[in-house]
Image (cartoon, rainbow, N blue to C red):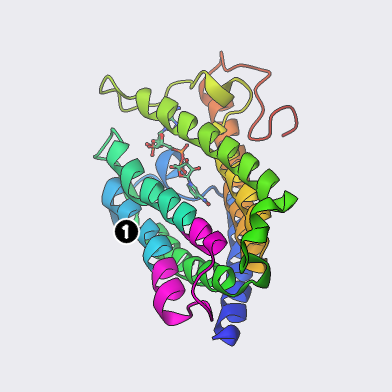
């Protein structure tokens, strides 16, 4: 099983490099960046439900059945397991149900790629959490990496949730186009949701401290940074009154 774990990490790294190389040229073709006349699509809501689902079932099956911890799981492992599952219940179930514009389409190829990535990532991270020696005792709860990581993660999650809510509310009146988002971290960046997401996973990675999480953070950056830059360019092209001081994704920097 350990061989499968390292192989999964290698594949995720390759997927991250491939994603970076392609999305720097052309943003992932969904939402505002969807290719006009795109064929082979499905509705966005079931698409999100489908391609995010492996993160919870792959993680849970690996953690409890496929490659469980040698002894019964420690309290730290159970905490990490719970936090991971809570996040994906939100991202894979509650978030799609909160979406307003239910007619939006999503490309099938992105669903397939997302599903495969999530399957591998859920497996690799569950294996890493279940087999990391430093997570086997409750002493890790007081390690500075755990404490600081948890604080950063919670802050990132709040920023991400608030940004998701601001974007969802932009269409609360039935409008189906795009408006300039304001408030929350949108005061500083165009992609406040991605900024929050990146901070959340960086904090989570610090808290868990495994190679699998480092690889996941790399993939998240490779996936979200180019898309944030593309959103930023798109806003500037489409709104002449777009706030000039706003950056793309990292407040004050990028
Ligand atoms: P987007 O910002 O592209 O879109 C989010 C939602 O808000 C979509 O429904 C979009 O509609 C709508 N929207 C965006 N901007 C506007 C606007 N200016 N006016 C009106 N509506 C708007 O984010 P994603 O769909 O890529 O991601 C959604 C969430 O999932 C985010 O919180 C993100 O962080 C997370 N995510 C995490 C990933 C990871 O690697 N961990 C990967 C991808 C997403 P439409 O679809 O019509 O554009």
Range shown magenta: 58-81
Tag 1 residue: 50
Q: Is residue 166 left or right of residue 125?
A: left
Element assignment for label 1: helix
Q: Nearer the viewer, residue 4 or 19?
A: 4
Rendered residue at 41%/74% (across/down): 64
Q: Nearer the viewer, residue 201 or 143?
A: 143
Q: Please, is residue 16 above or below residue 91 in the view? A: below
Rendered residue at 43%/25% (across/down): 166
Q: What x and y, as percent, mark residue 157?
A: 53, 39
Residue 146 counted in the magenta span:
no
Q: Quadrant of residue 164?
A: top left
Q: What x and y, as percent, mark residue 106?
A: 34, 50
Q: Nearer the viewer, residue 115 or 107?
A: 115
Q: Quadrant of residue 96?
A: top left
Residue 61 counted in the magenta span:
yes
Magenta stretch: dominant SS?
Answer: helix
Q: Please, is residue 30 above or below residue 234 in the view? A: below
Q: Residue furthest front?
A: 138
Rendered residue at 58%/25% (across/down): 185
Rendered residue at 30%/58% (across/down): 40
Q: Is residue 13 left or right of residue 144?
A: left
In the picture, which quadrant includes the N terminus?
A: bottom right
């Amino acid at each position: 099983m350990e061989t499968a774990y390292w192989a999964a990490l290698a594949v995720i790294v390759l997927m991250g490099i491939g994603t970076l190389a392609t999305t720097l040229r052309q943003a992932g073709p969904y939402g505002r960046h969807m290719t006009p006349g795109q064929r082979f699509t499905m509705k966005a809501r079931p698409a999100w439900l489908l391609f995010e689902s492996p993160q919870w079932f792959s993680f849970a099956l690996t953690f409890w059945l496929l490659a469980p911890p040698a002894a019964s799981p420690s309290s730290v492992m159970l905490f990490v397991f719970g936090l991971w599952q809570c996040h994906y219940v939100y991202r894979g179930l509650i978030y799609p149900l909160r979406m307003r514009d239910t007619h939006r389409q999503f490309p099938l190829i992105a669903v397939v790629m997302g599903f495969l990535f999530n399957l591998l990532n859920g497996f690799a991270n569950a294996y890493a959490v279940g087999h990391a020696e430093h997570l086997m005792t409750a002493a890790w709860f007081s390690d500075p990496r755990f404490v600081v990581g948890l604080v950063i993660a919670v802050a990132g999650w709040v920023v991400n949730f608030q940004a998701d809510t601001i974007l969802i509310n932009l269409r609360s009146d039935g409008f189906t186009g795009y408006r300039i988002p304001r408030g929350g971290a949108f005061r500083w960046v165009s992609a406040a949701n991605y900024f929050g997401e990146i901070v959340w996973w960086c904090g989570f990675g610090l808290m868990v401290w495994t190679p699998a999480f480092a690889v996941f953070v790399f993939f998240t950056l490779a996936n979200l940074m180019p898309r944030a830059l593309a959103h930023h360019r798109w806003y500037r092209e489409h709104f002449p009154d777009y706030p000039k001081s706003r950056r793309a994704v990292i407040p004050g920097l990028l």
